[in-house]
Amino acid sequence: MSTTRGRPGNGLVTPLQRSALPDVDNFTSPLGFSVRWLPGDAPVEVWRGNISSRFLSSGVSFEESPANGLLRARRVITLAPGSEGDAIWWHAGRVRAVGRAGDLERRVPSRVPRFELPNSVVTPGFVDGHTHFLQWALGRSRVKLGGAATRDEAVRRVAEGVLEQGWIIGQGWDANGWTEAPERRALDAVQSEPVYLDSLDVHAAWLNTAALAKAGIGRETPDPYGGVIVRDPSGEPTGLLLERAVELVTPHLPIPPADRLLPSVLASPEEADRT
């Protein structure tokens, strides 16, 4: 029997792909669980899709991503009545049982890898589907960054942007496949006016130096609750804002005039249907 303990990793946290509400003994839906440290510990792995998927984490990673395993945690929450415990067993990427570690230890074959995360809590992976329709509708007339395969391509599109009440505004960038991170100086090279670019998932914003100054964001600005001002090694903001740090900028963005809102919305449903 082999036992593996989680160790610090350096990857990215990825969203879960599907939910799973297992019964104790006969759950057959694909696994989509997240593991989180309880308060006071470091953040832990989020499992993406089937358990055999590659682990991407800023907290815990493993030497390999097994299709079979027994994990012991402090608590496993399933939201299925009568199905809780401190351990979870999966086989071929599917949950076989959730229950007490001692019970499962006796049932699970000795060849199955064991994982010990005694300070963690395991929950189902939830997926929420929603839209930001008005924001998307307005974005159709702004800098469109969807599909930009590189940072350079995104910057080229920003260079062609048209000012909107003193700002260059765009949306849709996705840096997951880029070899260079979103960074203010890349935007400074093509626009001297404030630049504000929403990410594809609307959980981050990419700004140039002028936009940071407009919002009063500098070296001494603290991270807001629930958000992060990404900084370089010297402590200067890089121009990337995460989660609620974006709210430091939004009050300074121009408000679209009322006579533009309705036409934008009315012109967008057919395009939304196609996409």
Image (cartoon, grey):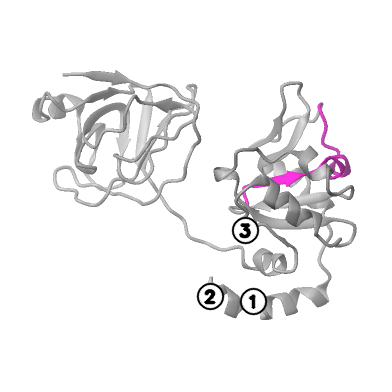
Chain part drawn in magenta = 202-219
Residue 203, percent across and down? 62, 48
Q: Which mark is residue 40?
A: none
Quadrant where the image shows the N terminus: top left
Q: Does 130 sit left or right of 223 as displayed?
A: left
Q: Does 248 sit left or right of 243 as displayed?
A: right
State the CA–CA distance, disc 2 to disc 3.
15 Å
Residue 104, percent across and down? 15, 29
Judge the density around disc 1: few (<14), some (14-19), many (≥20) Cα neighbours within 10 Å.
some
Residue 261 is drawn in which quadrant? bottom right
Secondary element at image label 2: helix
User: Residue at horizontal 64%, vertical 76%?
Assistant: 268
Q: Which is more N-terminal, label 1 or label 3?
A: 3
Secondary element at image label 1: loop
Residue 267, percent across and down? 68, 80
Judge the density around disc 3: few (<14), some (14-19), many (≥20) Cα neighbours within 10 Å.
some
State the CA–CA distance, disc 1 to disc 2.
10 Å
Labels 1 and 2 touching (C-beta < 8 A): no
User: Residue at horizontal 82%, vertical 26%?
Assistant: 220
User: Residue at horizontal 76%, vertical 23%?
Assistant: 235
Q: Would you name the residue on which mark 2 appears? A: 274
Residue 54, percent across and down? 37, 37
Residue 170 is drawn in which quadrant? bottom right
Q: Which mark is residue 268?
A: 1
Q: Which is more N-terminal, label 2 or label 1?
A: 1
Mark closer to the observer (3, 1): 3
Judge the density around disc 2: few (<14), some (14-19), many (≥20) Cα neighbours within 10 Å.
few
- The foreground one among 174 and 204 is 174
Secondary element at image label 3: loop
Type of amino acid under label 1 = Ser
Residue 207 on the magenta span: yes
Q: Which mark is residue 146?
A: 3
